Image: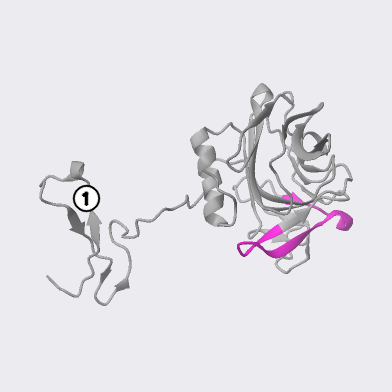
Amino acid sequence: MDRTLDFPRIWVPEWFRKDKRVHEMRLPTHLPGLGRRQYGITPDMGSSFPAAPVTGMVMWFKSDTGTFQDNTLSTPATANNDPMGGWVDQSGNTHNATQSNGARKGVFLTNRLNGAPSIRLGGSLKSLVTGSFTLNQPVDFYCVIQQTTWVAGCSFFASQGAGNPQLRQYLSGTTPQIAISDTGETCVNGDLSLNTFHVVQFRVNGASSFIKVDNGTNTTGNPGGTAFGGLWIGDVTGSLGVYEFVQILVYSSALSTTDATTNRQYFKGQYSSLPTQA
């Protein structure tokens, strides 16, 4: 045997051993002249996060990919404070979100969460809007978001055309909260604190609707059965609440609890500063 080979020790569980005397095996991580690379089982046995979210999304927006200053998607938005006129859907379904009105364009911000940029929207109708298409319930949203200014009634998401249903900022008594709104506010949740990035899941599915922030408790309610007619990202009411988006995933189905955890853990793996997700 060539003693220059590097064979890290990998523990072999007892149930896998044919020879009860074997307690470990060795696998090469590099070969002479080829440099270091992985073969077989990776010797780094530390904890890991999913490398990608659950597939099958209808829309997927990422702040570090497909950002443009114009609605024709010709001038990239990459510098701090660049206007946001277009955001390319990464799901492959081409539900791109655009804004042609300069007064309603959000802002691209650099180095906002573990080096990743964010898209700042909200306040005075600053928004990005997809084309119109029918998105029937159930609909599952997963997003990495930060509230920087809270104003009751300001929306994060709405049906294209500024309609309902919406995810919006909501005031109950004196407590700032978020809620799903259609004919009224429901699924009211107070876990989305200001000036901290969180993972928010909200499901619009009639009586099975809920909001969940990070790995917190679901707050449930029934906003009705209205379908989305595409997606409006940002404020639809003219309120002055402000928030930043880093990623948005949208599914036209109710994901399992396991898949929901996979998505939250994917976000945590991407942005380590996020709160605990599982």
In this view, the residue in front, 211 or 88, is: 211
Q: Residue at image x 14%, y 73%?
A: 2
- Residue 86: x and y in percent read 74, 56
In the depicted structure, whether residue 26 falls above or below residue 217: below
Q: State left or right for residue 110 relative to residue 260.
A: right
Label 1, on which residue? Answer: 12
In front of the other: 161 or 26: 26
Q: Is residue 48 magenta?
A: no
Mark 1 Cα within 10 Å, few/some/many (few <14, many 20+)?
Answer: few
In the picture shown, does residue 183 fall above or below 38? above
Residue 260 in the figure: left or right of residue 138: left
- Image location of residue 57, percent across then percent down: 58, 41
Work out whether residue 277 can be spotted. yes
Find residue 202 and report its horizontal and vertical position in percent.
Answer: 66, 36
Q: Which of the 4 quarters of the picture holds residue 162?
A: top right
Q: Please state if 145 lies on the left or on the right of 261 as rendered.
A: right
| Residue 53 seen | no
Does the magenta-highlighted stretch encompass residue 99? Answer: yes
Stretch in magenta: 97-118
Dot 1 amino acid type? Val
Q: Tell me where residue 273 appears, x and y as whole percent.
A: 59, 57
Closest to the observer, 243 or 176: 176
In this rendering, the answer to whether 224 lies above or below 102 is above
Q: Which residue occupies 52% across, 47% down? A: 265
Q: Is residue 73 left or right of residue 50?
A: right
